[in-house]
Image (cartoon, rainbow, N blue to C red):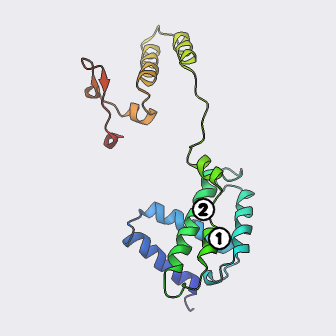
């Protein structure tokens, strides 16, 4: 059975991701899954025949597509990542000898709206408790048992340092400098 052009392009892109850009195997798998999703949507038409109408229809399809994991609509983050992966592939393909006829403007249509990109990256403001609400929550926490006192200490540390929960979990006693009244957290430890 002869190798189909799409399979050859996919194989070459995978090699490029692995060797030229140094992507991890999980990142490569995610990018290939996004590309396969687009290919299935276009019923395996050759990637060289990319049309703007296909990109628009694919975006609309994704907005109503269920997640394979939850069965609910795809998250905004997943939607944005799928489009980024597909755009990355077609930018790469357009830079090859075989794909030089691919219209760069059409490739750029694999971009989500700015609002969706900001939502996916968590750049939109999220509601946070006020300092008074945090103090009230802390005051309401019980402190009779060892575990309850530990929970209060963890909550107090979060309030005082604004450290991420994962970073807090990785702190060691050596991370706390009591005399200097500071906590040193290395990004390598979490």
Q: Is residue 98 visible?
A: yes
Crowding at dot 2, Cα within 10 Å, few <14 / some 14-19 / many 20+, comes out as many
Q: Position of residue 173 (x, y in %)?
A: 28, 25
Give the answer, above or below, for where 12 lies relative to 80.
Answer: below
Element assignment for label 1? helix
Residue at 53% across, 73% down: 91
- Number of numbered markers: 2
**The C terminus appears in which quarter of the rendering?**
top left
The percent position of residue 46, horizontal first and vertical second, equals 63, 83
Pick the front one: 170 or 87: 87
Residue 155: percent from left, percent from top: 46, 21
Check residue 38 in the rendering and tell me which mark sits there, or answer none: 1
Above or below, 27 relative to 116: below
Q: Which residue is mark 2?
A: 82
> How far is mark 1 from mark 2, CA to CA?
9 Å
Give the residue at x 32% y 34%: 185
Under circle 2, the secondary element is helix
């Amino acid at each position: 059975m002869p190798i189909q052009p799409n399979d050859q392009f996919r194989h070459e892109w995978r090699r490029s991701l692995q060797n030229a850009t140094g992507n991890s195997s999980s990142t490569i798998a995610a990018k290939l899954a996004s590309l396969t999703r687009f290919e299935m949507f276009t019923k395996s038409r050759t990637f060289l025949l990319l049309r703007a109408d296909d990109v628009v229809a694919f975006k609309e399809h994704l907005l109503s597509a269920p997640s394979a994991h939850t069965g609910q609509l795809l998250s905004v983050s997943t939607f944005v990542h799928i489009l980024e992966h597909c755009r990355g592939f077609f930018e790469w393909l357009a830079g090859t000898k075989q794909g030089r006829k691919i219209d760069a403007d059409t490739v750029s249509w694999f971009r989500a709206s700015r609002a969706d990109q900001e939502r996916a990256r968590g750049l939109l403001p999220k509601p946070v408790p006020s300092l008074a609400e945090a103090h009230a929550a802390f005051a309401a926490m019980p402190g009779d048992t060892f575990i309850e006192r530990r929970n209060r200490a963890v909550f107090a540390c979060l309030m005082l340092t604004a450290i991420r929960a994962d970073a807090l979990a990785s702190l060691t006693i050596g991370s706390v400098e009591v005399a200097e009244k500071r906590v040193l957290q290395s990004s390598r430890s979490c």
